[in-house]
Image (tube, rainbow, N blue to C red):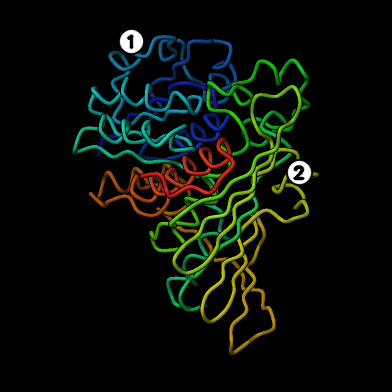
Amino acid sequence: MAKFRIAGINFDHFHMGDLLRMVHEHPDAELVGICDAQPERMVEATRNFAIPASAVFTDVARCMEQARPDVVILCPAAARHAEYTQLVAPYGVHVLMEKPFAATLAQADAMIAAMPADKLLAVNWPLRWDPAAATAKRLLDEGTIGEVRSYSHYGGNRGPLYHGADKIEKEPTAADKAASWFYSKAAGGGSLLDYLGYGTTLGTWFMDGRSPIEVTAVTDGTPGLEVDEHSVVVSRYASGLSKCETRWGTFTDPWTIQPQPRAGFIICGSEGTLACYDYEPCVHLQTREHPAVRQIPNDTLRAPERNPVEYLLHCIATGTPLSGPLSPAISRIGQQIVDSAVLSALEKRTVALVK
């Protein structure tokens, strides 16, 4: 079987380096091209993965025509997700878009509409591949805590400029912040757009695809910044209230030392509760039969469920539909909640779920 030809286009988001590493390490994948309008942003990837100069591009059309990829990984700023999907979709490729889905629901719908009917559009939420989240979902599907009624998510880190690909730590300057799309309102920056989708999309997954009725959101107003660094969002479901909190400025990064509050989910059901905290080796379970909290070791993730590249290529090869947070159906509900939260924070009132 011929290897999947994969190209990585737009390096706005540093997660491109992580995704290219997954391609590089996959036995059935071939990295045939990378592309960015700023060549300096591709230097690290070119070195890390021994990419020849002939496979490095600064023009999307030239990359698509010469590299001829089967799959394109996209990591543009949130506000350009639809634009880049529309650029590559006419070439008949599958697309893996790094989170969030988009900056707005309208842009997410434009992405769905742009894709050929026989090609997959996957949205990668890195938290989906945390064994704690996967273990929690298995326990929920097995009915361990009964009917899921609500969830609470705390998500964030010290800030998007404090780390790069492979979680290599950095110390950003004020100039770095001023130049970064993460701090640009027009580019889709801000902690709410960066992190709320994690809570709302995985929360939708945990809730088996149910949607809330209305949303209330509050964001901070840091002087000198045009985007938020902290938000609190409450969604009202028929079954109760769920909360998501996003934070740039946690005391520590959760992948090194869990901050307080701990990053992750607490899920409440009719017969118990379940907590899955990011990067921890176990989940925390209590049920009516065992009210004392028990630590349940995380499942070991196995192929093809270990990372987004492996999973997407499996779905393409086997004709299996995308499921969970990577599917546009689940991610779209997450985006609906995000759009509702943006509107609520702007108008300082509770709003009905944006349709």
Q: Residue at x 33, y 10 (%)?
A: 62
Q: Which residue extends farthest right?
A: 251
Q: Residues within 10 Å of mark 1 (few under 14, many from 20)?
A: few
Q: On residue 62, which mark appears? A: 1
In the rendered structure, are the residues bearing label 2 and label 1 in contact, judged by CB atoms less than 8 Å apart? no
Q: Residue at position x 70%, y 24% from top?
A: 225
Depth check: give the residue in front, 279 or 23: 279
Cα distance in 3D space between marks 2 and 1: 42 Å
Q: Which of the marked residues, 2 or 1, is nearer the chain's N terminus? A: 1
Amino acid type at circle 1 is Arg
Between residue 16 and residue 301, name the one nearer to us.
Answer: 16
Q: Is residue 241 above or below residue 154?
A: below
323 or 192: nearer the viewer: 192
Question: Residue 222 at what x, y percent from top left?
Answer: 74, 30
Q: Quadrant of residue 226?
A: top right
Image quarter where the C terminus lies is: top left
| Kind of residue sitting beneath label 2 | Thr
Q: Residue at x 32, y 35 (%)?
A: 109
Q: Residues within 10 Å of mark 2 (few under 14, many from 20)?
A: many
